[in-house]
Image: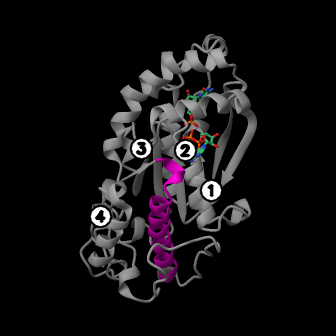
Amino acid sequence: MSVLFRSRQLVAGRVFTTLCSSFRPKVNCRMAASSSEPKTNGPNGRYNGRINGVEGKSPFLIGVAGGTASGKSTVCKRIMEKLGQVDVENAQRQVVSISQDSFYRELTPSDKAKADRGQYNFDHPDAFNEDLIFQTLKDILAGKKCDIPVYDYRTNSRCEGQFITIYPADVVLFEGILVFYFPEIRDLFHMKLFVDTDSDTRLARRVPRDINERGRDLEQVLNQYMNYVKPAFEEFCLPTKKFADVIIPRGADNTVAIDLIVQHIREFVVNRKQVRGEGQITPSPATSPVHGARRPNTPDVYFKRPH
Ligand SMILES: Nc1ncnc2c1ncn2[C@@H]1O[C@H](COP(=O)(O)OP(=O)(O)O)[C@@H](O)[C@H]1O
Ligand SMILES: Nc1ccn([C@@H]2O[C@H](COP(=O)(O)O)[C@@H](O)[C@H]2O)c(=O)n1
């Protein structure tokens, strides 16, 4: 196994400076399933000697942070595509992606007026409903079905009465600019990714996106960027890069990094389904395992707890 990881590290080059420690085997699931063994507590005592602490019912929760327009949602989409999950009906999905933007606080009338003038700081941690994020992720980890608010950037508010239902899944991706900012939330993730795209590229992507998709004009986008987005990125988002297990330079262009992450997810899912005696996740034909197919019954494919 260590040979495999060493060769993976060489393939990925500088991308995976922390990946090796993420993959370091600490719990063999076959052993962990035994009730006679000593219990091994992970962050928040969640593991307790079993996969995610609840005998395979809890999803593998992945946090995906990074600056605005770094490609967080695109990376999540690529991961889902490679796992053959994009065309799967919502209720049947084994891998789901949720945006932190769904958890912006409802604005007071005066804040709403500020937001309409581009003078509200949506990049400050206070703009997010931290308690709702925490409770939602706890519910997801408990295997509960959850309703996530739908957010409308054009009105700077939630869409009244509209929710996306998240059904219990094997893997949940939670992406956003400040997903690693709040310690209690950060500690919930089993794996933490940081999408590291250079700031000129991010601005060049944000401008057309905000104009075309978020109903803004050029002046508003640039003012907001200079007054709020850039300073908040430096103060609140960038310092959270140090919490990442895997840093992904160039975002979705970095197919090597994405393939390695997908491989890790697949190993988790395969192992859990073995433990539960179920079928396996269906990879899309486009999926390209970095080191080729591996036999699912051999011990080296059992999920290795990342922390
Ligand atoms: N690798 C890429 N090459 C070109 N455009 C990209 C790439 N990744 C993302 N984009 C575009 O940049 C914009 C922001 O990407 P997105 O994934 O939504 O970022 P984030 O979720 O970090 O805000 C979108 O318009 C997206 O289509
Ligand atoms: N009403 C809003 C809410 C958020 N924003 C900006 O969105 C950015 C976060 O989303 P990304 O997809 O870019 O990660 C954040 O930088 C906010 O400035 C907004 O403009 N309006």
- Whether the residues at callouts 3 and 1 have beta carbons within 8 Å, the answer is no
Q: Earlier in the sequence, mark 2 or mark 3?
A: 2
**Image: 41 above or below 275:** above
Q: Position of residue 87 (x, y in %)?
A: 73, 63
Q: Earlier in the sequence, mark 2 or mark 1?
A: 2
Q: Residue at x 46, y 43 (%)?
A: 65
Q: Quadrant of ligand 2?
A: top right
Instruction: Tell me the CA gap for discs 4 and 3.
Output: 24 Å
- Whether the residues at callouts 2 and 3 have beta carbons within 8 Å, the answer is no
Residue that label 4 marks: 20
| Magenta region, residue range | 250-274
Q: Secondary structure at mark 2?
A: loop
Instruction: Tell me the CA gap for discs 2 and 1.
Output: 27 Å
Q: Amino acid at mark 1?
A: Lys
Tell me: is circle 1 under 8 Å from ligand 1.
no
Mark drawn on residue 185: 3
